[in-house]
Amino acid sequence: MAEQYLTHGYPVPVTTTLELPGHKIVRHIGIVRGITVRSRGLGPMMVAAVNTMVGGKIEVFVSLCEAAREEAMQFMLTHAREQGANAVIGFRYDATELAQGVTEVLAYGTAVVVEPL
């Protein structure tokens, strides 16, 4: 089942599969992407250093990663809507460390126009 995300007030179904259950793909628009680059910053690094000594989940990094993924996804959804899509299939994330403490997060997929069956 596809997740529903809002962009510019419109719901956009997003799925990792190459089809959208209950819908027919009537047009493939092409690849859409959203990218963000984030750094950890000094504050989170100090909190993470303390958490590392104690062990367990490092919540400050989890929050940072979630925020970066959400931002990249919203950029991708905006790109899809600008291209005339009403859904994204084949959705994926990718991340690359550009420098120590600096990470690029990429959200990408195939923009499509779908109609209910």
Image: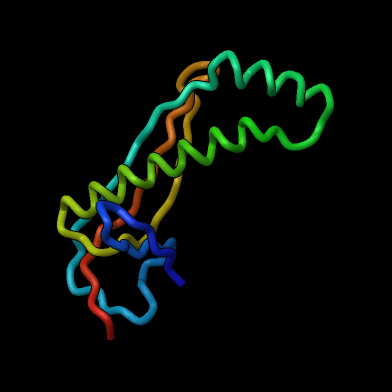
Which residue sits furthest right? 54
- Residue found at x 24% / y 64%: 86
**Relative to 53, 1 lies left or right:** left
**Relative to 43, 19 lies left or right:** left
Q: Is residue 115 above or below residue 78?
A: below
Which residue sits furthest top? 42
What coloring was used for the rendering? rainbow
Q: How many discs mark residues in the rendered view?
A: 0
Q: Where is residue 6 shown, x and y percent of the image?
A: 34, 57
Q: Is residue 113 above or below residue 92?
A: below
Q: Where is residue 14 shown, x and y percent of the image?
A: 38, 61
Q: Where is residue 37 shown, x and y percent of the image?
A: 40, 27
- Residue found at x 60% / y 17%: 43
Quarter placement of the C terminus: bottom left
- Identify the image quadrant of residue 116: bottom left
Which residue sits furthest bottom? 117
- Identify the image quadrant of residue 70: top left
Q: Where is residue 44 shown, x and y percent of the image?
A: 61, 21
- Residue found at x 34% / y 53%: 109
- Residue found at x 23% / y 77%: 115
